[in-house]
Image: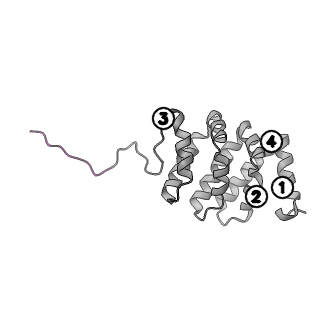
């Protein structure tokens, strides 16, 4: 006679660090809601899942249409270093796409990123610099980045 045995281990293809993603058109709106969650673990999981999605320029375009950049700008000043790290990584990946660079200019992401110049976490500063490097590849992005350093409140000369 067979006995049912339930394992205490997670299935090998389940990653507990990522939020479950909805299918189709509901995936990005759900992640956008989770980014605004007061619960730290929910925000972290949503950022991990979003990090995988923004490699596709179509997802970057949809994310910008849904207002992700405003939420990501807000998360840049989060007290949790993991949230700041994943947020800067997502912004760097988005800056790799032309549509993302134009979105940065339209949504004034550059000044928000510049606030991380003195962040205590090395990887946050590195991702910020990588995003600026990608912005400099677009003439309008180069101009916007240079103007950021010329403003007196940004510490430019």
Q: CA distance from mark 1 to mark 2?
A: 8 Å
Query: Which is nearer the N-term, disc 4 or disc 1?
Result: 4
Q: CA distance from mark 2 to mark 3?
A: 35 Å
Q: CA distance from mark 4 to mark 2?
A: 17 Å
Residue plotted at (35% across, 44% down)? 11
Query: Which is nearer the N-term, disc 2 or disc 3?
Result: 3
Q: In the image, which disc is placed on residue 148?
A: 1
Relative side of 138 to 71, left or right: right
User: Where, by quadrant of the figure, is residue 115 drawn?
Assistant: bottom right
Residue 95 in the image, given as x and y percentages of width and height: 71, 43
Judge depth for marks 2 and 3 and give the one in front.
Answer: 3
Determine if the magenta segment contains residue 5.
yes
Judge depth for marks 1 and 3 and give the one in front.
Answer: 3
Q: CA distance from mark 3 to mark 4?
A: 34 Å
In the image, farthest residue toward the right? 157
Determine if the magenta segment contains residue 128.
no
Q: Looking at the image, do the residues carrying marks 1 and 3 touch, with CB atoms under 8 Å apart?
A: no
Query: Which is nearer the N-term, disc 1 or disc 2?
Result: 2
Residue behind mark 3: 23
Residue behind mark 2: 114
In terms of secondary structure, what is the magenta stretch mainly? loop
Q: Secondary structure at mark 3?
A: loop
Q: In the image, which disc is placed on residue 137?
A: 4
């Amino acid at each position: 006679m067979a006995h049912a045995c339930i394992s205490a281990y997670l299935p090998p293809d389940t990653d507990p660090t990522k939020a479950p993603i909805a299918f189709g058109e509901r995936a990005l709106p759900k992640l956008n809601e989770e980014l605004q969650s007061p619960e730290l673990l929910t925000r972290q999981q949503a950022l991990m899942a979003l990090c995988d999605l923004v490699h596709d320029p179509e997802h970057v375009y949809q994310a910008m249409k849904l207002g992700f950049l405003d939420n990501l700008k807000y998360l840049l000043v989060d007290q949790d270093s993991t949230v700041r790290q994943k947020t800067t990584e997502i912004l760097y990946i988005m800056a790799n796409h032309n549509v993302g660079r134009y979105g940065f200019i339209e949504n004034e992401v550059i000044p928000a990123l510049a606030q991380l110049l003195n962040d205590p976490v090395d990887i946050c500063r590195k991702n910020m610099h990588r995003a600026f490097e990608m912005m400099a590849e677009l003439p309008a992005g180069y101009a916007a980045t240079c103007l950021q350093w010329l403003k007196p409140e940004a510490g430019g000369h």
